[in-house]
Each structure stands twice: as structure tokens, then as C-alpha cells.
Amino acid sequence: MKKEVKDTIIVELGQKLKAFPHFYLVDLTGLNAEATSNLRRKCFKSEIKMVVVKNTLLHKAFEASDVDFAPLYGCLKGTTAVMFSQTANVPAKLLKEYAKDGVPSLKAAYAEESIYVGADKLSELVALKSKNEVIAEIVALLQSPAKNVVSALQSGAGTLHGVLKTLGERPE
């Protein structure tokens, strides 16, 4: 491969690292062409950009980045694919589907500005919630007491009205 081509690939990887806030390093060893094609289709449907890269080029892209990816350098061995995503837990959920087969396996991930190294971190990554999910939970928690108060007032108003009506209709 010519140096110009390598430089172009490094720049493109650097742009993807900036464009996508989350990425997973995955080992595809053991996948045949059909299984790899199926994985790519699932990635496309889940809005995940999967790229198979040379480890040395990815290492150079990491070095050129503003973020310190030094803990990931040890994972750059063997066949490496990078799954770029806008949502932190989507690639983890996809990889969990394949967990029973063991292929592809998680090498490492950069999600929610944290680095996860090792396949044992997959369950933690699946449990991660996106910022939108966390915001929705907080809004629901904040709305819950207000809903309870309104509900109590509405039922109390009906009860109070019923009591007054019964007292008014009662013979004296």
C-alpha cells in the first residue's frame, strides 16, 4: 500500500473518530464471508458504520486524535473492525446477539467518554443508557409527584362533591 493511500485512510479514520462519539473494536476472526455480510447488514439497519482496518493505521489515527486512546493500543492485534455509532449501547446490543457463538467478540470500546477493555465489559455496555434515555427517565420521575397530586385533587374533588350532595339530599 502506498504512503499516500495510508495517509488518506488515517485522515478518514480521524474524521470518523471525531464524527462518531462512540466506537467499538471488534475481532472478526472466524467469520466467513456470509456471516460478515449478515453482520454488515445488521449494522446498517442499526445505523452503525462498520469498517475493517489495519491495526497500525488505526493506531496512528488514535495518536493523531485529541483524545488519549493509549489504553486501547494493546487491543490492536489480529483482525480488527471498528463499529462507529451515535448511540453508545446499540453496537453492544448487536454484539450480544452474537455472544453465544463467540464471534465477533468485543476487544474494547469507547463509549460515553469512557474506555472499556475486554469482552467481559459487554454486559456493562449493553446496560449503558443514552443521554436521551436518561433525560426521559428524569422527566418521568419529575412528573410523577405532580401527576399524583393532580390525581388526588381530582378524586378528592369528586369525593367532596359526592359527600356534600348526599348531605344536601338527606332528610332533616
Image (cartoon, rainbow, N blue to C red):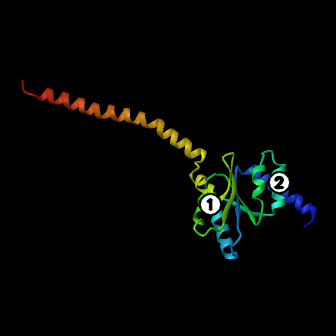
The mark nearer the N terminus, 2 or 1, is 1
- Is residue 56 or residue 86 the one in the foreground? 56
Q: Residues within 10 Å of mark 1 (few under 14, many from 20)?
A: some
Mark 2: which amino acid?
Ala
Whether residue 47 is visible to the viewer of this picture, yes or no, is no
Residue 13 at x, y percent in the picture = 80, 56
**Mark 2 highlights which residue?**
61
Please state, as top left, top right, bottom left or bottom right, where the N terminus lies in the image.
bottom right
Q: Which amino acid type corresponds to the residue marked 1 in the rendered image?
A: Ser
Badge 2 element: helix
The residue lying toward the viewer, choosing from 12 and 156, is 12
Q: Are marks 2 and 1 in contact (CB under 8 Å)?
A: no
Specify the quadrant that holds the C terminus. top left
Quickly name the residue at label 1.
Answer: 46
Give residue 14's position: percent from left, percent from top. Answer: 81, 52
Left or right placement of residue 157 versus residue 171 in this view: right
Residue at left offset 58%, top offset 48%? 129
Find residue 102 and report its image quarter: bottom right
Q: Residue at x 88, y 61 (%)?
A: 6
Q: Is residue 77 above or below residue 34?
A: above
Q: Nearer the viewer, mark 2 or mark 1?
A: 2
* Badge 1 element: loop
Q: In this view, which residue lies farthest toward the right?
A: 3
Q: CA distance from mark 2 to mark 1?
A: 25 Å
Residue at x 77% of width, y 66% of height: 78
- Is residue 77 visible to us here? yes
Q: Position of residue 66 (x, y in %)?
A: 80, 44
